[in-house]
Amino acid sequence: MRFNGAVLITNSCFSDLNAHFDGYAVGSKNADIALANGAKQKLVGLLVQQLRAEGIHVAQITIAGSIKGTRWEGENPIAPSTVDDKFFDL
């Protein structure tokens, strides 16, 4: 199938339906972010359905970790170029 464009979205592992991630989100006082990311994941699914007929590819990359150089950088951060490469692979 030839695509007429793409919508590429990043999300965090907080968006997953997973008790471990939910517990971490609550414990780290990030429940609000987890809720927003869950809604974003739903949006991705809706956009896939809505834009497929127009030939627009919609994809999401879920990041399970922190990104180097951001204010949320933690241990073993992911290089921004790694995220770029994953999007390019799509």
Image (cartoon, helix red, strand yellow):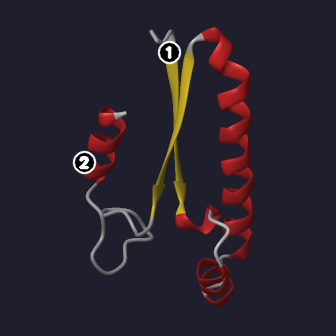
Viewport quadrant of the C terminus = top left
Amino acid type at mark 1? Gly
Q: Which quarter of the picture shows residue 75?
A: bottom left
Disc number for residue 5: 1
Disc number for residue 81: 2
User: Against 58, is 31 above or below?
Assistant: below
Q: As drawn, which residue projects farthest toward the bottom?
A: 27
Circle 1 residues within 10 Å: few <14, some 14–19, many ≥20 = few
User: Against 52, is 61 above or below?
Assistant: below
Camera-nearest label, 2 or 1: 1
Q: How far apart, in angstroms, are the residues tagged by discs 2 and 1?
A: 22 Å
Residue beneath the point at 45% across and 9% down: 2
Circle 2 residues within 10 Å: few <14, some 14–19, many ≥20 = few
Q: x, y percentage for residue 45?
A: 69, 39
Q: How many marks?
A: 2
Question: Judging from the image, what secondary structure is the residue with disc 1 in?
Answer: strand
Nearer to the camera, 48 or 32:
48
Residue beneath the point at 60% across and 68% down: 14
Residue 89 horizontal side relative to residue 60, left or right: left
Residue beneath the point at 59% across and 78% down: 21
Amino acid type at mark 2? Ser
User: Against 61, is 68 above or below?
Assistant: below
Question: Judging from the image, what secondary structure is the residue with disc 2 in?
Answer: helix
Q: x, y percentage for residue 28?
A: 60, 86
Q: x, y percentage for residue 40?
A: 68, 49
Q: Which quarter of the picture shows residue 78?
A: bottom left
